[in-house]
Amino acid sequence: MDWDQLKYFQMLAREGNITKAAEKMNLSQPALSRSISRLEEEIGVPLFERRNRGVILNEYGAIFLEHATRALSEIGEAIQKITDTVDPLHGTVSLAFIQTLGSSYVPELISRFQKQFPNIKFQLYQDTTKRILDQVDAAEVNLGFCSPQEFVEHLDYALMVKEELFLIVPSGHRLADKKEVDLVEVSKDPFIFFKQDTALRDVIDKLCEETGFKPKIVFEGLEERTVVDLVAANLGVALTPFSPNIDVGKVSLIRVREPKCFLNIYMVWKAKGYMSPAVTTFKNFAMENAMRFNSNIGKGF
């Protein structure tokens, strides 16, 4: 049993699909299957149940995953501590973030940080909130920027961004000239939504539920630009953060009075996990700069 076998097992357990897991690990499917088979032979029991569309952990696999994750985390921390001892300010920060932060927030934050600490490097990953929480919990990344709706007990959180969501409607919409509206006023309108598992989808689902209506969803987009373009094409209305790139000649941005519509972004890290000097330095920098970023959100609207 070796490090690679444990990593392959952990990835397959998470993905539940040999093809997807092999792609994530840059392996061929046969190589991954052979590694898992050897692991099962060594342990003496099967760890997965095969299904038509993939695999799921059986009771033995669930037990082994718990201990394998702990072992990988301990070994990873040991390697990191040794690296830090050799050169504490030339480390690497592994950072995962949701899609909405990729266009400006994360690049700007890292750029400002590296002006002060040019020798600290970054490994960046973009994923959904759920996957990011799993990655932080498994010590696969040092820090996550995401929008959890519920907090995991053994992770720590710091609010970084409180970003207002605006209603956007086509320029010819009945509410286009309004400055403020209640969300219920568009309860009968078709909606352009964000795809499942995205941070914005989770938040908007909850806002509609709190308002007391189930939206009529006509399209689900992955990126804000796509959603805005579809609203401009008169296909529906949407909730989205403010962006200076929105063409106000084609859509109108309207502030929502009730309910208050905000996307809360948290920085997340493992509560009792090892944190290198490089990661600690970046975490503190991000927290110190959170207020500055929030003060600029929506400026000029």
Image: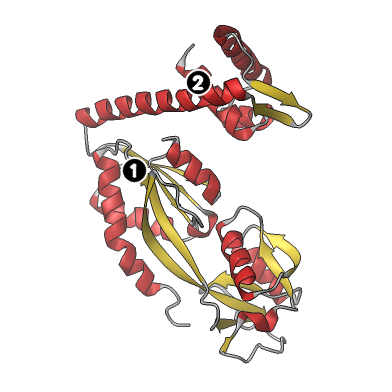
Residue 59: horizontal and vertical position, in percent? 61, 24
Q: CA distance from mark 2 to mark 1?
A: 23 Å
Residue beneath the point at 27% across and 55% down: 285
- Residue under label 1, please give it: 271
Residue beneath the point at 64% across and 69% down: 209
Badge 2 local density, few (<14 within 10 Å), some, or many (20+)? many
Residue beneath the point at 47% across and 14% down: 2
Mark number for residue 198? none
Residue 189: horizontal and vertical position, in percent? 74, 78
Q: Taking 79 as reference, is 131 above or below it? A: below
Residue beneath the point at 56% across and 89% down: 179
Report helix, strand or loop for mark 2: helix
Q: Quadrant of residue 141?
A: top left
Mark number for residue 6? 2
On screen, residue 104 versus residue 176, left or right, reads left
Q: Considering only order in the chain, which callout, 1 or 2, is on the residue closer to the N terminus?
A: 2
Report helix, strand or loop for mark 1: loop
Residue 68: horizontal and vertical position, in percent? 47, 23
Q: Taking 150 as reference, is 26 above or below it? A: above
On screen, residue 109 versus residue 21, left or right, reads left
